[in-house]
Image (cartoon, grey):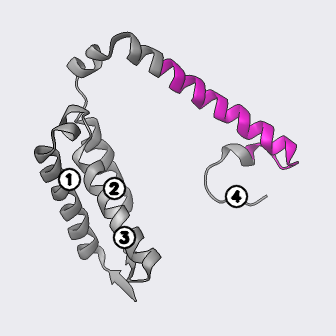
């Protein structure tokens, strides 16, 4: 069975997932202590539930993606609101090391993409351009 949700129903489901995330974050000290954002909590639970429905054949959901870009901006903005300078300062040396490793991985993935593109004899930019490409 395919359940198709229009734009309003999709937003309602997203708001319900967000409210569930906020509720669970307030009730579970571990989530609060590790600064797991409410949108992430609700989103992961929603994703797991829809995945279980799909895999078991109970239901397949089709969401309207008209407001996808707007909602993604809202999501990442809400995650950014969870960080504050006090928390960042408390990270100290470990946070600086983590930042260095992240920067190194970002650069490494570009070299890996170019190397694999050359190995596969496809244009090197194909390895760097996200999304479907036509070569």
User: Element at badge 2?
Assistant: helix
Would you call the spot at circle 2 few (<14 residues within 10 Å), some (14-19), or many (20 or more)?
some
Would you call the spot at circle 1 few (<14 residues within 10 Å), some (14-19), or many (20 or more)?
many
| Distance Cα–Cα, label 3 vs label 4 | 29 Å
* Residue identifier under label 2: 44
Q: Reply yes or no: does residue 119 show up in magenta.
A: yes
Question: Which quarter of the picture shows residue 69?
Answer: bottom left
13 lies above or below 114: below
* Residue identifier under label 1: 21
The image quadrant where one finds the C terminus is bottom right
The answer to whether residue 5 is seen in the rendering is yes
| Distance Cα–Cα, label 1 vs label 3 | 16 Å
User: Element at badge 1?
Assistant: helix
Q: Which callout, 4 or 1, points to the residue nearer the camera?
A: 1
Of marks 4 and 2, which one's residue comes earlier in the chain?
Answer: 2
Residue 97: image location, x then y, percent: 47, 15
Question: Which quarter of the picture shows residue 13?
Answer: bottom left
Residue 102: image location, x then y, percent: 51, 26
26 lies above or below 6: above
The answer to whether residue 65 is seen in the rendering is no
* Residue identifier under label 3: 50
* Residue identifier under label 4: 133
| Distance Cα–Cα, label 2 vs label 3 | 10 Å
Is mark 4 in CB contact (under 8 Å) with mark 1? no
Of marks 4 and 1, which one's residue comes earlier in the chain?
Answer: 1
Of marks 3 and 4, which one's residue comes earlier in the chain?
Answer: 3
């Amino acid at each position: 069975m395919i359940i198709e949700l229009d734009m309003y129903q999709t937003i309602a489901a997203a708001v319900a997932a967000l409210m569930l995330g906020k509720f669970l974050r307030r009730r579970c000290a571990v989530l609060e202590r590790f600064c797991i954002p409410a949108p992430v909590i609700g989103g992961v639970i929603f994703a797991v539930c829809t995945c279980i429905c799909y895999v078991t054949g109970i239901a397949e959901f089709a969401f309207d993606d008209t407001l996808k870009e707007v909602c993604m901006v809202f999501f990442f903005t809400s995650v950014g609101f969870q960080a504050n300078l006090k928390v960042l300062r408390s990270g100290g040396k470990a946070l600086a090391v983590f930042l260095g490793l992240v920067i190194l991985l970002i650069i490494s993935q570009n070299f890996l993409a170019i190397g694999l593109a050359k190995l596969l004899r496809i244009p090197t930019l194909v390895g760097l351009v996200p999304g479907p490409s036509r070569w």
